[in-house]
Amino acid sequence: MTLHNYKELLKTYNTGDIAFIKSILDGENINYRIKGENFNMVGPLVQPVTFYVQEDQIEDAIELLSDLDIQFIGVS
């Protein structure tokens, strides 16, 4: 996966939040990449799913997600 010109937005373990975040970003035409979506529940060391957003859209993405009650680890 190439992440040139992308910045980390957030990490989450919650599969419901992953689908919800994707639908919000898709609805606003925010360009994003996801790392670990298919492997976040595989053990023994569970890793969070990481969302990356195109650099020129990161502020828009943060604004879109800032008021949501999701179980994310953090917004960069």
Image (cartoon, helix red, strand yellow):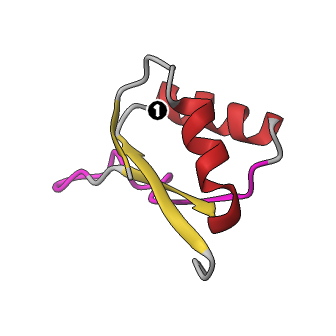
- Seen from the viewer's position, the closer of residues 9 and 26 is 9
**Residue 72 point in image, percent of width and height:** 36, 35
Left or right of 72 in this view: 57: right
- Which residue position holds label 1? 15
Left or right of 47 in this view: 14: right
Vertical relation: 46 (above or below) 26: below
- Seen from the viewer's position, the closer of residues 31 and 38 is 31
* Residue lying at 63% horizontally and 32% vertically, measured from the top left: 64
Q: What secondary structure do most residues of the magenta stretch adopt?
A: loop
**Residue 8 point in image, percent of width and height:** 46, 61
* Residue lying at 50% horizontally and 29% vertically, measured from the top left: 66
What's the amino acid at mark 1?
A: Thr
- Seen from the viewer's position, the closer of residues 46 and 5 is 5
Left or right of 64 in this view: 73: left
Residue lying at the far top in this picture: please name it: 69
Q: Based on the displayed image, in which of its 4 quarters is residue 33 positioned?
A: bottom right
Range of magenta residues: 30-46
**Residue 27 point in image, percent of width and height:** 81, 34
- Is 45 part of what is drawn in magenta? yes
Residue lying at the far left in this picture: please name it: 44
* Residue lying at 71% horizontally and 32% vertically, measured from the top left: 23
**Residue 11 point in image, percent of width and height:** 38, 47
* Mark 1 surroundings within 10 Å by alpha-carbon count, few (fewer than 14), some (14 through 19), many (20 or more): some
Is label 1 in a helix, a strand or a loop? helix
